[in-house]
Image (spheres, grey):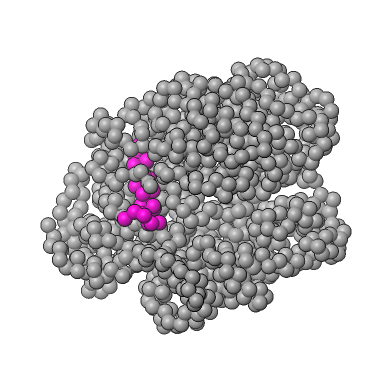
Amino acid sequence: MKTIKAIGSESRRNFLRVAGAGAGLLALGALSGKDMPFGKPIQATPLANHKRVIIINMLGGNDGLNTVFPTTGAVATKYQTKRPQIAYLPGQGLSLTGGPNVPDYELNPALVNVQSMWNAGDVGIVYKVGYPQQNLSHFVSEDIWSWGARGGPLALPGVAPGWVARYANAYASTAMGVVSIGVGRRLDFEGAATSPVLVSSLGAFNFDTDYNYSSNHVLRLAKVQAILGQQPTGDLAGDIAAAQLASFAGSAAVQSAIADYTTYATANSIAYPTNPGSTNLTSMGSRMRDVARLIYGGFDTRVFYTGYGGFDTHAGQIAAHTSLLTTLDEALAVFRTDMQTMGVWNDVVIVVISEFGRRSYENGSLGTDHGHGNCVLVLGGPVNGGLFGGISSTDMDAEHLPYDTDYRDIYRELLQDHLGNNPAAIFPETQPTSNIPNLI
Amino acid sequence: MHGKPLSFVLLSLLLAPLLFGPTGCVESGGNAGTPPAEEEDLSVKMTLSESDKIHFLRRTQFAFTPADLQRLNTLGYGPFLADMMDLQVQPQLESDALAASVADADFPGEQELARWWLYLMTHNQNPFQEVLAMFWHDHFAASTNVLAAEARFWEFDHINLWRQYGTAKLDELLYRMTTDWLMLEWLDGVRSTKNAPNENFAREFWELFTLGADNGYTQGEIIEASKCFTGYRTRLIADRAGPGRDQLVVEYDGARHNNNSKTIFGKTVAGNGQQEYRDMVNLTLANRQVAEFICRKLWEYFVYTSPSQALVDELSRGFRATYYDLKLLLTRIFQSKAFFSPRAKAGLVKNPVEHVVGFQRATGLLITPTRSDNALIDIGQRPTQPPTVNGWPSGTFWTSSQGLLERANSLRDSVYYRNEAPQAGYDVSTLLQPGATQDFQVVTRCAWILQVALNTAQFNECIDYLNTDRNGAGAIISQPWDPNDPVQREKKLRGLLYILGNLPTYAIR
């Protein structure tokens, strides 16, 4: 099942690099392509014309209505009436009349840089995205997004439960074909035949040494790898051993990519946003930089999955939501510059999702409860900028916004027209409506 | 280089049951015979083998230690179980934990709170108290990250709820949970009022805490239940902890409670003020799904995953018959033949806390609670801060590449920080049995302490490690194992424990 080789002399060399000791003695040129099991070439260069999708998940249920809000007509009046204390009024947000020119909505005032991208025609806003029979549980709804099937794994007998795993198995089965950063082992990756790389951050993807006996510690690590290579396969322990071996090979390749990227970023003055009064990057700043590091390092990743939490704004929503969107906005701005500097902005598409939207009316705690239909932002060089779908006055009468674009139709569009892969086998479940937005 | 051949092969064969067990067991086919299959059998296992006892200790005590085994043998299994279920306050331990990790108990920091609990986990003489508390903390998951500085002291009571009531009656545990201050803050109970009931707690109360998702309730009933859960509020009390030291408290305010009658599960809940929190617990416990939900979750944590419906039915029948007595339920589980069946012993993935705390308890290579905390942040399971109300992932969710790498790094901390207080002066060779210090005896003993399974080739790699070193120029050199050389003892015993701790079977409990 697992495609990780037992560690032999080749990976032993990789491992010596990561262990630090003797790293300077190793000439990089001595490693051929096949010596790099993680698909990274010797020279750090972004792959040319390699299309990628970056999923950013706003965990907790982003309030789409306050992210892109109506400003004209009955729909705007109803929006303001149902949210007397938390609605944005016309002029309080950022105009969308630049670029594709949409006069009836504004962007949340925190999304300053998204507005610039909109003006450049790089942002698609898909409104009223959801799925049949919306579930109001965070966890069930997240799972439905992860499965890519309303009916869950039962609707997809015989295939991997997670849609990213199905994609990896069909079109990106290399070690770094799909990567998750900062959001744990998501269900989306469940069932991938190649042990997926799921990291909290790239920097931590490294083996620490015992400084009391650092030379001996290199020997210990070699013994660990030798012992893992002798673990029989076919059971839980065998699976764990395979994942451990992957961590040895992966950390070597990733740490060398980080070093390469740092040189490039310094030379080009690319700096991701930091927390106020600190040199630590923001959550999304750090995660988008990690995506950039892998792209710069020449890894063949097709799907990156990242995100951040805090969107479950049942109370005191405005301040929290503004801060969350600012975090995203600032990170996206630097990421765009970064990609343009590398010359790959036209190869990446970012899709910003959330498990559901929020109720159309505010609750008594200056917040909103779980809802249905939501808006999804799609950003990148290849994107056809504009608004896809929209909210009607009747929609605003309802407790929950309905959905008219199935979330899988967005993924279908990205697979078909951006990644160039047939999505049929990835989203095989029959769905009641299909309305694929022409995003690419 | 260093004569070993025949004797090791023989020894490995003799030790096969030890070296290959308990995780090397093959799962039996389980045909539907007349007597219940062992893995389904809830009747009491009368005679326990040593391997049974070790299995029990590994599942319930963070780690196996020879001292625990000896104590179990001295007391007998029944009394040992009764002892560990008795979650009494241990004054000395409690004050030591506070002194070791918290500067100002009225205003603890987030890090201090995590360290406080980690100290308890590594030092409690009844580790089951912390194992079970961690189970409930994962189940009724609430994080300190929502607490302001004036409110962080709530966390002591919050964690002590799981530590002291983990084996109580379920209704008692649930009622205390519904009125716990952190829980009221975490799921917006303190903002749920008469005219604006907040659904957050009501939904999770059923979905995640008692019934399971979409299992016997409707959205309309969530709205009704959220009206019952109204009335609590926070209040800042000036100088509560001394001059200039304001603290936040949670209080019940009847004027904020929605006292209309509600209809839930076809029954009418008359306006009953604060008592409706108990009414909601009782009304919920009248659904048999609660017993099934809790029994299944405990079983999957302590025994094996995906138990049959028949087993869950049988277990939950007993749980209901004892009026939801958790102590009796846990005792029944730990005494059952099923608990000791090959399927149960086939292995569950250790969660990161068990990995980090267990290695320290098993080897005596203690690290500071700060270092344990940092390691657990990296691996992704910081006690006191579950990521969501759904708790942490479980099982193979933990076996990602980086998670395993970070586990290796936490073991590195244990072997590296030899000069820091928790282990300064500790002689790691006390783990060895007197007079049994030859290389093969050392490997066998350390593998037994960590309960890892080694095949012959892996065993020989360990022997090879003890008899070599790597010099400054990076060359591997022969250096025959000398147990009397203190430098070798320190370096290589620590190194051996690090290597064995990185075996895949160490990640399994």
Residue at 15% across, 63% down: B4
* Magenta span includes B481: no
The answer to whether residue B183 is seen in the rendering is no
Give residue B419's quadrant in the image.
Answer: bottom left
Q: Position of residue A410 (x, y in %)?
A: 60, 31
Question: In the image, B202: left or right of A270?
Answer: right
Image quadrant holding the C terminus of chain A, namely top right
Q: Residue at x 49, y 45 (%)?
A: A160
Main SS of residues in magenta: helix
Q: Name the residue rendered at 64%, 41% in the picture.
A: A355
Front-most of A308 and A388? A388
Using residue A424 as the reference point, say whether residue B158 is left or right of it.
right
Q: Which residues are magenta?
A: A232-253
Q: Find residue A414 and report its horizontal and vertical position in percent.
A: 55, 29
A62 relative to B73, above or below: above
Dividing the picture into quadrants, the one containing residue A294 is: top left
- When asked about the image quadrant of residue B282, the answer is bottom right
In-image side of A78 versus A385 (left or right): right
